[in-house]
Image (tube, helix red, strand yellow):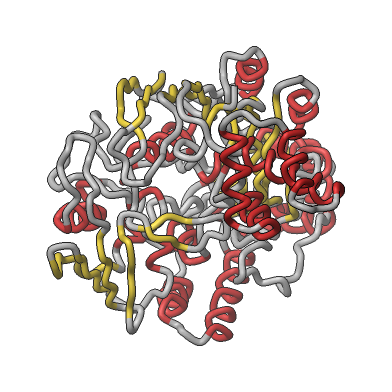
């Protein structure tokens, strides 16, 4: 039941609500509803507002059927349907059509039951998950504990090359502890395990799966076609375990790396929903009849990466010089057009409960930047690798290039195409840019991007003290102590890591106004990549 329907029922009572809704279903107009309610003895003004609620509720009732085309911001031959190997919005969106996790994350990033109908723990170290009955994979096989054991443990196998291996290392054992029950034992307590298991990498696949090209999962859509780097086509799973969902008959998902081309495809009517819109395109989309914008403020950021193991980033003074070149307020205003909040060279954003607000803000300071540059002894042309794939990185780098000239720093901005950027340049360039999608909790982002042995440790910054704090914070049940640990880690990253984070970015999506059911989920754009089972067409 929608919020408007609930409010309507509270005002008129369940029986009258049912009568009005039935009348609407049969085709009654707002005038009919108003007459009906006035006849019940209500004042015309009250009845009018209730009639509006009733018709609004009716208008928001999901409709079944129809086909949409959706465009993400990337396309590459490395596109994958293996949940363990997902690495971008395109992968996440596709896999959320095909698979489910034990839990899912709601709009407050709290874990909700999904394939597990319940979960509990006594000590945050041993967790028991009760699996939902009646769930079947796309090929008809029933979900079993063995599928869960296989899906979670494969992340620990180096041969899997899981992007979540560093998160899965804390899992000691996963075993079937009953016909519909799975017990997970961690190496140390972690109160956030249900949150972690709600992220896309931990989606459940069939036991023994090695070929993921068929996309066999328990999700809302079945795979009809998949051409990496080109498109995928998904059709409704009629046996989906969520009653009434999904609503659409078919979704075609493509990747369009160029933002202008994505917007043009939307406004021409060829695409119904697009991700990752530049703020400069917002007015154009809003000003075109039949189209709208959805904004999701979150912890997403594009970061300057200065590798600590090779190139000028090996010198800590050069790193400080670059960080002091960030004119953050100007970047927020002129690059993000205020669709962002100022960052402070650490990855926990102000919406996170563990954000350390008392960390002194690093200022834009040309004198300090010049002092550290001269102290570093670094001279000559410095290549800086950027790409439209890393949101705003080209604009940020060009602004830094102009500013750097004022202190004698020669930055050579090299713009790479979006296609292939993540596999060819990210993590490989001595000085370059990354783009980090929002993560559901502090532990996940710190583990995946800053733990010494993390595959995505962008600047190769290594700190045994940081690693120890990270592990200790997971198991600390005293909230005040845990906050202090996260504050200390944010301070260490701010001071020592080769990462500069000027802003936390809002995700901006564009869509046809015929597409209903969209709402922000702050783990990322496109409803936290989970739009597919929630949207419908009101054609």
**Residue at left 61%, top 30%?**
388
Q: Would residue 478 be visible to someone looking at this image?
A: yes
Rendered view: 506 above or below 113: above
Q: Could you say where residue 480 lies in the image, as x and y percent from the top left?
A: 58, 85
Q: Could you say where residue 22 lies in the image, as x and y percent from the top left?
A: 56, 39
* 149 to the left or right of 283: left
Q: Could you say where residue 167 lies in the image, as x and y percent from the top left?
A: 36, 61
Question: Which residue is nearer to you in this view: 245 or 364?
Answer: 245
Q: Would residue 384 be visible to someone looking at this image?
A: no
Instruction: Kindly indicate the quadrant of the structure image that contains residue 166.
Output: bottom left
**Residue at left 41%, top 18%?**
230
* 306 to the left or right of 407: left
Question: Which residue is nearer to you in this view: 494 or 447?
Answer: 447
* 451 to the left or right of 400: left
Rendered view: 515 above or below 319: above
How many numbered discs sit on the rendered protein? Answer: 0
Question: Which residue is nearer to you in this view: 335 or 468?
Answer: 335
* 263 to the left or right of 374: left
Rendered view: 483 above or below 365: below
Q: Could you say where residue 232 lies in the image, as x and y percent from the top left?
A: 38, 23
**Residue at left 45%, top 54%?**
457
Q: Quadrant of the C terminus?
A: top right
Question: Which residue is nearer to you in this view: 462 or 47?
Answer: 47
**Residue at left 33%, top 69%?**
119
């Amino acid at each position: 039941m929608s919020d408007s329907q609930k409010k309507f029922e509270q005002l008129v009572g369940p029986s009258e609500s049912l009568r009005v809704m039935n009348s609407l279903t049969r085709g009654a107009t707002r005038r009919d509803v108003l007459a009906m309610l006035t006849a019940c003895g209500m004042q015309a003004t009250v009845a009018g507002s209730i009639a509006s609620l009733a018709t609004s509720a009716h208008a928001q009732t999901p409709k079944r059927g129809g086909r949409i085309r959706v465009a993400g911001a990337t396309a590459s031959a490395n596109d994958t349907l293996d949940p363990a190997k997902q690495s971008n919005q395109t992968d996440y969106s596709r896999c959320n059509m095909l698979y489910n996790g034990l839990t899912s994350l709601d709009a407050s990033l709290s874990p909700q039951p999904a394939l597990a109908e319940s979960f509990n723990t006594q000590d945050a170290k041993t967790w028991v998950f009760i699996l939902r009955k009646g769930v079947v994979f796309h090929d008809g096989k029933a979900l079993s504990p063995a599928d869960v054991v296989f899906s979670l443990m494969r992340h620990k196998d180096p041969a899997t090359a899981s992007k979540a291996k560093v998160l899965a290392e804390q899992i000691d054992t996963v075993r079937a502890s009953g016909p519909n029950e799975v017990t997970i034992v961690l190496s140390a307590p972690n109160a956030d395990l249900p949150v972690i298991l709600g992220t896309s990498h931990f989606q459940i696949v069939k036991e023994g799966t090695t070929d993921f090209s068929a996309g066999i999962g328990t999700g809302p859509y079945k795979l009809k076609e998949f051409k990496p780097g080109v498109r995928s086509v998904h059709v409704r799973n009629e046996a989906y375990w969520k009653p009434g969902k999904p609503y659409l008959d078919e979704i075609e998902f493509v990747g369009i790396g160029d933002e202008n081309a994505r917007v043009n495809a939307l406004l021409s009517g060829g695409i119904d929903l697009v991700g990752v819109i530049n703020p400069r395109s917002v007015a154009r989309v809003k000003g075109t009849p039949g189209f709208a914008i959805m904004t999701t403020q979150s912890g997403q950021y594009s970061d300057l990466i200065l590798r600590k193991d090779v190139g000028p980033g090996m010198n800590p003074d050069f790193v400080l010089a670059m960080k002091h070149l960030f004119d953050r307020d100007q970047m927020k205003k002129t690059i993000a057009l205020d669709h962002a909040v100022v960052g402070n060279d650490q990855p926990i954003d102000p919406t996170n409960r563990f954000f350390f607000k008392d960390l002194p803000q690093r200022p834009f300071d040309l004198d300090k930047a010049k002092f550290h540059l001269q102290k570093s002894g670094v001279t000559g042309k410095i290549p800086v690798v950027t790409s439209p794939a890393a949101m705003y990185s080209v604009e940020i780098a060009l602004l830094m290039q102009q500013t750097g000239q004022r202190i004698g720093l020669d930055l050579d901005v090299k713009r790479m195409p979006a296609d292939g950027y993540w596999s060819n340049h990210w993590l490989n360039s001595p000085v370059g840019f990354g783009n980090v999608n929002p993560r559901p909790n502090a532990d996940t982002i710190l583990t995946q991007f800053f733990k010494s042995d993390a595959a995505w440790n962008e600047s190769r910054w290594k700190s045994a003290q940081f690693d120890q704090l990270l592990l200790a914070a997971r198991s600390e049940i005293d909230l005040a102590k845990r906050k202090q640990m996260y504050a200390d880690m944010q301070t260490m990253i701010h001071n020592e890591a080769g990462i500069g984070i000027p802003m936390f970015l809002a995700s901006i999506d564009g869509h046809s106004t015929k597409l209903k059911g969209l709402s922000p989920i702050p783990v990322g754009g496109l409803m936290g990549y989970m739009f597919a089972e929630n949207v419908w067409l009101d054609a």
